[in-house]
């Protein structure tokens, strides 16, 4: 028996079934017309933002990193809740434009921006979080050619990292951002060029559950920004402090202590150095905002025994849930939170292996899971499916195609 | 410095550039209109099939597993070369129909076939490689409802595995196929139902480079088929012996000794047991047929230094090359074969890290690679990109979208 991850808060039972946004899993599947299906809950998105607003000082804005979940209705809903958006490609820029986001609140990071993407972003008035001296030169040249004033911030590769983060994006040699010591000269060049100087972006890592590590890193970020502002010799209009707030996926994971992070931030913004007194501060969050708000629903198409092991074979799989299958940046596979959606209040009574429909041993959704009895036609729910699910999985694999998605 | 994998045979230099199908990399990019670009070579596909035909006894047919590369022009080209096809989903069935494959030569394996997929396959006359007693019951019921005679084979979960294979699909409890000991009763049920009995599918693993292991497994497959035919009490119209032939991806990998495999198979088919005397035999190959015929071409959009490390940032990445990035079924990342496509005859002169354009540290194409000097605008080629590249990667990740594909 292997433990399952913790089911996020806010998912209740209705008529014995998992309910999402006040509606039963089976009624959601009926409305969607098919499985597999991602369901995202407005209520859970609202609740998460409310928690953040309550914990954080007013001074700190919240940006949504669209890459975590680019489903258009989710992005549109987030537009009512957050202060800005981060995009990572020309494709995400088109999405941002198509749902009518305010481009003055959008910034674009990414180490491999093509010329076409830079031009589209400059035309739209998006802030470029520039990742290298070469990219700054290209952006300035393209803006001149377009006859436009580009909005340019610099992404810094800090010499410190976010301790305990799932993905480290600072500390030592990195393809992301500009090494600290190169930043002042490049920033001065941007300012002297006549571009609109937008400040700094310091992103150190993601998926950290330790409040202490996040607090320590935020202190480092502010100190670095202060020092760089001094060396640049100009105030920072904006400072994107990065994010890194993680969510619990696995057995034993403890949720981030948001109150502690909020208290520390409140203290810090009360005693900002002069160089940052007028600076617009924001956090950039993706997974933390949407990850726990999504559930992946899939239908059991076979139940079989092999050498004493029971398999529940579903019509979903790693083509929509690459990370849950254990094949995306993980060394040891562990179980995400999983449940039998239409028997959500039933007691576990057997050990089963839940697999996807793909013809590969990589396609695992839960190993040795203790679950209520389930059979063909029942629904398996995989939780924590709101971020990096639908868009971060190989949906064309084995000719399967994308899952349905809905926001309720 | 970390070694690169071996560049497959058949890729020459033309005017200093990598040539594919007799055309230079830059002219191919020009024709496609953009990068990233997958180029598949007819010539390499033809050569691989010719090698197989020369090595294998005539008695052994070759099936192409479409999942390895479902690009329609590749599938159409393979139709001229192989004896049958294997599909893994309703989506692949639609593809097979759209390119006009002979459905009598198509079989459908996969542990999670939905009712709609079973019905579509039965209607089309495709052979079902049934994966469980439950699936057989569903197929028989649906065929009756449709008023059609289904073509049914059984996929066996053998008690042995393919030693040294990258993906083990036999030996012990598995979600794939029917445990050996359950096969005879289910086969008799199929035959008694009036369905068209199509025999057995025994697939034990994939990506094996050891001829000895493959020869041993083929011996086990034939012995098992003989024993099961006896226990079923009816001859096997067909036996799909599986595949498992691997290709070298990494430094130190030795190509499969095809001559040894072919010699052993020739010997075996010369002394088949009576039960298999009339049986149609085939191998099911995917990666081995197409993997080395494909090259992924991507353009360098930035060259940067960070703390003494040189990064070449490309406009491609793990969204098209998940396996090459080291994030698909691999524990330790190793380098695929990689080259600077437009300086294919130049000597290596520096150590670089080649990364993709995605804003994640997972997006690596080559670590510590010894390559000729390259800069913005040059092309990086990733070899062994013909199988499980475009379709097995999360192309929507970060809003990037699919790569171009062409067959030359």
Image (cartoon, coloured by chain):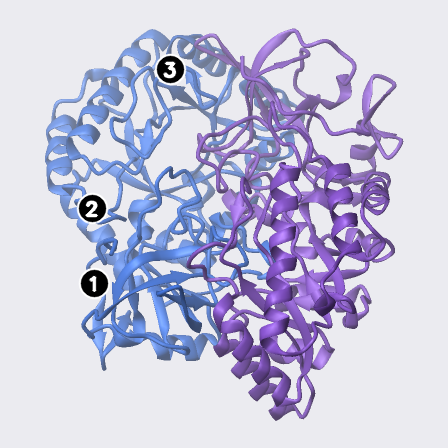
Chain colours: A purple, B blue
Between residue A313 and residue A155, name the one nearer to us.
A155
Front tag of 3 and 1: 3
The residue labelled by disc 2 is B52
For label 2, count other residues whose C-alpha is less than 10 Å away and answer few (under 14), some (14-19) or many (20+).
some
- Spot occupied by residue A374 in the image (x, y as percentages of width and height): 67, 15
The residue labelled by disc 3 is B172
Residue B202: quarter of image: top left
Judging from the image, mark 3 belongs to the subunit labelled B
- Spot occupied by residue A274 in the image (x, y as percentages of width and height): 73, 67
The secondary structure type at the circle numbered 2 is: helix
Q: In the rendered image of this protein, does residue B103 appear above or below residue A176?
A: above
The secondary structure type at the circle numbered 1 is: loop
For label 1, count other residues whose C-alpha is less than 10 Å away and answer few (under 14), some (14-19) or many (20+).
some
Front tag of 3 and 2: 3
Q: Earlier in the sequence, mark 3 or mark 1?
A: 1
- Spot occupied by residue B291 in the image (x, y as percentages of width and height): 32, 51
Q: Residue at x 64, y 29 (%)?
A: B115
Q: Is residue B226 left or right of residue A189?
A: left
The residue labelled by disc 1 is B10
Alpha carbon distance from label 1 to label 2: 16 Å
């Amino acid at each position: 028996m292997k433990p399952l991850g913790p089911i996020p808060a806010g998912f209740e039972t209705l008529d014995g079934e998992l309910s999402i946004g006040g509606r039963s899993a089976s009624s959601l599947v009926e409305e969607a017309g098919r499985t597999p299906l991602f369901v995202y809950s407005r209520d859970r998105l609202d609740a998460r933002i409310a928690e953040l607003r309550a914990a954080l000082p007013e001074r700190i804005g919240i940006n949504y990193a669209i890459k975590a979940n680019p489903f258009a209705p989710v992005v549109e809903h987030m537009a009512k809740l957050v202060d800005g958006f981060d995009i990572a490609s020309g494709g995400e820029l088109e999405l941002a434009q198509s749902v009518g986001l305010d481009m003055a609140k959008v910034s674009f990071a990414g180490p491999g921006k093509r010329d076409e993407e830079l031009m589209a972003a400059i035309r739209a008035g998006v802030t470029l979080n520039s990742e290298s001296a070469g990219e700054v030169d290209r952006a300035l040249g393209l803006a001149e050619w377009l006859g436009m004033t580009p909005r340019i911030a610099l992404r810094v590769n800090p010499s410190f990292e976010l301790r305990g983060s799932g993905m480290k994006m600072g500390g030592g040699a990195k393809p992301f951002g500009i090494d600290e010591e190169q930043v002042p000269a490049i920033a001065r060049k941007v300012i002297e060029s006549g571009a609109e100087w937008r400040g700094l972006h310091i992103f150190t890592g993601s998926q950290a559950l330790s409040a202490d590590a996040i607090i320590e890193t935020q202190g480092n970020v502010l100190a670095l920004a202060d020092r760089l502002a001094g060396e640049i010799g100009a105030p920072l209009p904006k400072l994107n402090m990065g994010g890194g707030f993680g969510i619990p996926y696995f057995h034993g994971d403890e949720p981030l202590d948001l109150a502690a992070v909020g208290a520390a931030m409140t203290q810090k913004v009360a005693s900002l150095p002069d160089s940052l007194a007028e600076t617009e501060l924001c956090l950039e969050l993706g997974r933390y905002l949407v990850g726990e708000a999504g559930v992946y629903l899939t239908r059991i198409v076979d139940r079989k025994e092999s050498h004493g092991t029971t398999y529940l074979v579903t019509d979903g799989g790693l083509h929509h849930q690459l990370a849950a299958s254990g094949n995306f940046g993980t060394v040891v596979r562990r179980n995400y939170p999983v449940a039998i959606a239409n028997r959500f209040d039933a007691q576990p009574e057997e050990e089963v292996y839940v697999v996807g429909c793909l013809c590969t041993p990589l396609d695992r959704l839960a190993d040795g899971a203790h679950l209520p009895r389930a059979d063909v036609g029942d629904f398996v729910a995989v939780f924590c499916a709101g971020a990096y699910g639908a868009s971060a999985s190989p949906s064309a694999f084995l000719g399967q195609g994308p899952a349905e998605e809905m926001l309720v």
